[in-house]
Amino acid sequence: MDYAIPLLLVLLAVVNSNLIRVALATGRIQSRLLPLTRADNRSGFWMALLFQGLITVLCLAAAAFRLSELL
């Protein structure tokens, strides 16, 4: 049960990295709240991708930190 939180954090990082990959391939952020396209709003598109990248890195860092405490 101790490994559940790091596993969920890694899963969230994988989902975020997949969203980044799809956004780069299609030029569109897949969001119901704030749909962005690269052509309509360049800076907003890249800032959203930067934010997703930051969340991915933070999830992986938190998972690594948590696993290092467990081992």
Image (spheres, grey):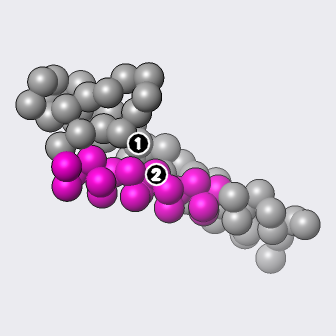
- Looking at the rendered structure, which numbered label has been put on residue 52? 1
| Image quadrant where one finds the N terminus | bottom right
The quarter holding residue 39 reads: top left
- Is 12 on the left-hand or right-hand side of 69? left
Magenta span: predominant SS is helix
User: Magenta part of the protein: which range?
Assistant: 9-26
**Callout 1 amino acid:** Gln
Foreground of the two, 1 or 18: 18
The quarter of the picture where the C terminus appears is bottom right
Residue 59 included in the magenta stretch of the image: no
Q: Residue 16 carries which label?
A: 2
Whether 14 is drawn above or below 34: the answer is below
Residue 33's place in the image compared with 51, above or below, is above
Is residue 10 visible in the rendered image? The answer is yes
Residue type at numbered disc 2: Asn
Against 42, residue 61 (above or below) is below
Q: Does the magenta run of residues contain 19?
A: yes
Choose the circle earlier in sequence order: 1 or 2.
2
Which residue: 58% across, 54% down?
12
Q: Which residue is drawn at 26% across and 28% down?
A: 36
Across and down, in percent, residue 48 comes to: 32, 33
Residue lying furthest left: 39
| Residue 67 image offset from top left, x and y in percent | 73, 68
- Which residue extends farthest front? 32
